[in-house]
Image (spheres, grey):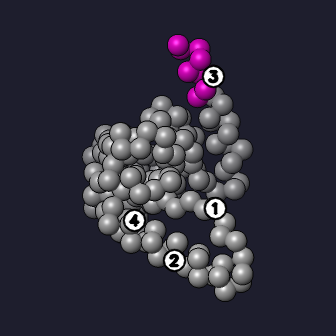
Amino acid sequence: VTSADEVKRLKRRIAHMARQVCNERQAELPRFEVGAMIESPKACLNAGKIAEHCDFILIGTTDLTISTFAIHRDDAGRYLPLYLEQGILDADPFVELDDSSVGELIRIAVDRARRARPGIRIGLGGGHSNDASTVRWCIKNGIDYITCDPHRLPMNRLAAAQAAIKDVITT
């Protein structure tokens, strides 16, 4: 989503459909949560207003990287190696989270969302969440959870544990 109005409309629609299904099946309405996925710079800037209507937020790094860099992964293969070779970019932005751009947008989103709803859970998903350095970055920047490929879970748990130990040692 990119705006609070989208979330409000979708939340009403979800609640309506849940009530309809439960009425049809003569079942009790279960408790459920509704969250938003933020994947654009505009959504990061609107995160405070979006958070007012959500139980949680998930930030999608792949699409956020695409929209921030105006580069699509499918096209980047033609020129990204040259950019890396010539030092135009320090790292492949689809592999390593770019702290000065995508990272800054995420920090803005987290800050604005938490100012609007202090207890809101904020997660990170996308290709970057499969990288140990991103797991450490998430801990440092107040991200509550990540989504990742199942086979990456042991590595990500190890990265989180290592970051926690490093934090304890350095403080």
Q: Quadrant of residue 144?
A: top right
Which amino acid, by three-letter code, is at mark 2? His
Residue 169 magenta-highlighted: yes
Nearer to us: label 1 or label 3: 1
85 sits left or right of 162 in the view: left
Q: Circle 3 sits on which residue?
A: 165
> Residue at left 61%, top 54%?
148
Horizontal and vertical percent position of residue 90:
35, 42
Residue at numbered disc 1: 31
The mark lying in front, picked from 2 and 4, is 2
Residue depicted at 66% across the width and 78% down the height = 22
* Residue assigned mark 4: 7
Alpha carbon of mark 1 to alpha carbon of mark 2: how far?
A: 13 Å
Q: Earlier in the sequence, mark 2 or mark 4?
A: 4
Q: Nearer the viewer, mark 2 or mark 3?
A: 2
Q: Specify which label sits upstream in the sequence, 1 or 4.
A: 4
Question: Which residue is the site of mark 2?
Answer: 16
**What amino acid type should be assigned to the residue bearing mark 3?**
Ile
Work out whether mark 1 precedes mark 3 in sequence or the reverse, and give the earlier one: 1
Helix, strand or loop at disc 4?
A: helix
